Image: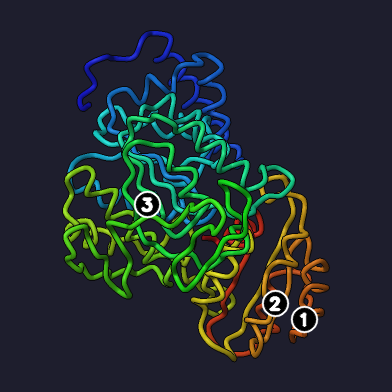
Amino acid sequence: MTGNSDPLSPRAKLAVTAGKAVAAASRAAGRGSGSVIGGKVALKLDPDLLARLAQHLDVVLVSATNGKTTTTRLIAEALGAAGPVVSNALGANMPAGITSALAGGSEARYGVIEVDEKYLAGVARDTDPKCIALLNLSRDQLDRAAETRMLAENWREGLAGSKAVVVANADDPLVVWAASSSPNVIWVAAGQMWKDDAWSCPSCGGVMQRPGDDWFCGECGFRRPTPSWALSGDHVLDPHGSAWPIHLQLPGRANKANAASSAAVAAVFGVPPQVALERMYQVQAVAGRYDIVQFQQRDLRLLLAKNPAGWLETFSLIDPPPTPVILSVNARGADGTDTSWLWDVDYTRLTGHPICVVGDRKLDLAVRLEVANQNFQVCDNLDQAVQMSPPGRIEVIANYTAFQDLRRRVGN
């Protein structure tokens, strides 16, 4: 499905023009990128606009609790080898933001779209994707998102009978349960470091058995499927057993897993693993994540972690002690206002790191660190935290809106 053979109607063109104008006004007023408000206005004028904008594209949808922005970027880079790509690269992943992104893609061949977990089924209906990548499901935004089992059930119902090729993580039982309703699934052994949301069987509620990397339910027989793609150390194993080296500028095992899933997606579109993985090397940072910036004559590496699974992965990639660490947590609408998830994060992994704490909910975090017997200081702001940090590159870990605050402060 390539080439825009069905041009937009006058109503759709008006909606696109109005949306772009509102977005531009929002940017001029310093209110952010304007993609969400622009998309909302456009959809108000033409409720079917998202479907119209996607009709000439081969679409990939990417959904997960963690890693979807990075994986979307990696897939977009890989598919660029086969033709022009339009993508919501800044992470506006609900229908309004997706609509804004696709409005700029009239000449594109591929649409690579990150989708919020709650909206996946609806966006899939509108965009008729050729491929859907499902990476993981874990607890996040406890006051907004459904319980993880409910999200998996929504995915399972929404994707039942889908014509799309589903590329799914075989190591996450919730993802496997969700994807198993689809007739065409490619399983990827991408790993699962955080397991605390998948100890009960999503099929029958029984206790999951997890010997080594395997998993199964001893009561109903629901079990890990045999993967055709796998992450193996620094290589991706394809369905033929060939090992392709992963060379990324992005740090950590989680990003190698993202690359493995991205290579499997690229292959659906005929892009060979070697070409896809070589193109992924070009990605240095994703919407500011992993950027190293200079601030007050210090190097700061900016890392996003917004839920227990994300913090666990982030702790695994920071430099070892005594590297200084700054932690920042907010609890605004985009973060979820419930901070009880802090108690699910194993902060003992920071033992030996000098820690400074900032952000709207720095006292919530301070209590958690006190219980974890960590050495930390509570600071008024980033400037003070940097001044109080001992020498060396500083690892700065923040949740969503705290991360945006930090980027503005450092001019990134």
Q: Rounded to the nearest whole Å, what is the CA distance between mark 1 and mark 2? A: 8 Å
Q: Secondary structure at mark 3?
A: helix
Q: Secondary structure at mark 1?
A: strand
Q: Which numbered disc, 3 or 2, marks the residue closer to the eye?
A: 3
Residues at discs 3 and 2 in contact (Cβ within 8 Å): no
Residues at discs 1 and 2 in contact (Cβ within 8 Å): yes
**Pointer 1 or 2: first along the chain:** 1
Front residue of 291 and 1: 1
Q: Rounded to the nearest whole Å, what is the CA distance between mark 3 and mark 2? A: 31 Å
| Coloring applied to the structure | rainbow
Q: Position of residue 257 (x, y in %)?
A: 38, 63
**Residue type indicated by callout 1:** Gln
Sort mark 3 into few (<14), some (14-19) or many (20+) by Cα contacts within 10 Å. Answer: many
Q: Quadrant of the N terminus?
A: top left
The image shows residue 322, relative to residue 247, as above or below, that is below
Residue marked by disc 3: 73
Left or right, 97 with respect to 147, comes to left
Q: Position of residue 140 (x, y in %)?
A: 64, 52
Q: Is residue 311 visible?
A: yes
Q: Position of residue 375 (x, y in %)?
A: 74, 86
**Pointer 3 or 2: first along the chain:** 3
The image shows residue 4, relative to residue 141, as above or below, that is above
Residue marked by disc 2: 385
**Residue type indicated by callout 2:** Ala
Tell me which residue sits at (52%, 20%) in the image: 43
The image shows residue 287, relative to residue 12, as above or below, that is below
Residue marked by disc 1: 377
